[in-house]
Amino acid sequence: MGPPTAKEYPAQYLIASAMAATGCYPLWRSAAIGQSGFRVASISVGGLAVPQTLAPYVYGFLPPYKGMAATVFGMTYARAAIFYFSDYGRELMLSRGYSEAASTVAPPLVVSSLVQVINQPIVRATVTLQDPAYDLPNVFQSLRHLYSTHGIAGLWHGTTAGVLKTVPKYCTAIAVKDFMEGFLSEADASSPTYETDRLLRSAIKSATAGVAGAALTNPLDVIRNEQFKTHLGLRATVGSLYREMGFRFFARGLGKNMVAVALPVGCTIFFTDVLIQLSQDHHLLGPHRE
């Protein structure tokens, strides 16, 4: 069995992205609240008061889950497109004689930039929706509020920071994924623990790629979400954050972001590997069942 070819498995990329986006939605919500600096009122769970320092974390897991469908949809098609076309583009460029470096970096650079620009209104509307200060019921009303308040350009406010955050994150994650794919030893097909070894290899590769991408881009996440909250430009936002927190703003929401970004990116890679492996195994076993 040769290495998987991305072109043959678009459904696996899409399903894996949907699984990761759905399962990690509460983590994304907590990170969006924390990085944006939204103020969460005192809350209690089961009659017990939640400490104010933990309130943003807990709030992200509590209903109502405003904007969940739009958030999951946006994340699903965005990550599926980025990983699928990055892997497919890499294979295509390598087959045409381009270098390993160019084939690894160019596809995610182009695809993630396009996806971020297209997805920006949904991203901005869903992040704004998580602010407890706004009594907006759904994403449609959030989009209407942004349009009526800031015009059509307001829907793409924060795009520069979003691109600066998204592109390096996915370029880093995909480069690390491809490096780990070549670095880690292949599981021994004759070993009695072959299936477990194969899953463990995918888990190590996926976790390393997810953490690398998330750690690099946290400051840009903070800047983008602060722009959503204050409606300031990029330079004004950075200046405001620096005056308020100094360089500590680089780490604002880092803990939540490491989970909310690293986990879904890692899960997307891992689930894609698993689904492709299952499809390949099913294909190999097919003739023996006839």
Image (cartoon, rainbow, N blue to C red):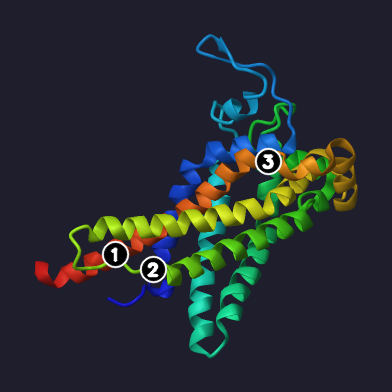
How far across and down, in percent of the image, does residue 223 sit? Answer: 78, 47
The residue that disc 1 covers is 279
Secondary structure category for the residue under label 2: loop
Q: Earlier in the sequence, mark 2 or mark 3?
A: 2
Q: Mark 1 and mark 3 in contact (Cβ < 8 Å)?
A: no
Q: Secondary structure at mark 3?
A: helix
Q: Nearer the viewer, residue 83 or 262?
A: 262
Of residues 69 and 185, the one nearer the viewer is: 185
Left or right: where does residue 268 sit relative to residue 101?
left
Asked where in the image residue 170 lies, by quadrant, the reply is bottom right
Q: Amino acid at mark 2?
A: Tyr
Check disc 2: other Cα within 10 Å, few if <14, some if 14-19, many if 20+: some
Query: With respect to residue 49, does 86 lie above or below?
Result: below
Q: Is residue 216 left or right of residue 21?
A: right
Residue bearing the label numbered 2? 9
Residue located 86% across and 46% down the image: 237
Q: Give the distance between the C-alpha atoms of the residues marked 3 and 1, in whole angstroms.
A: 36 Å
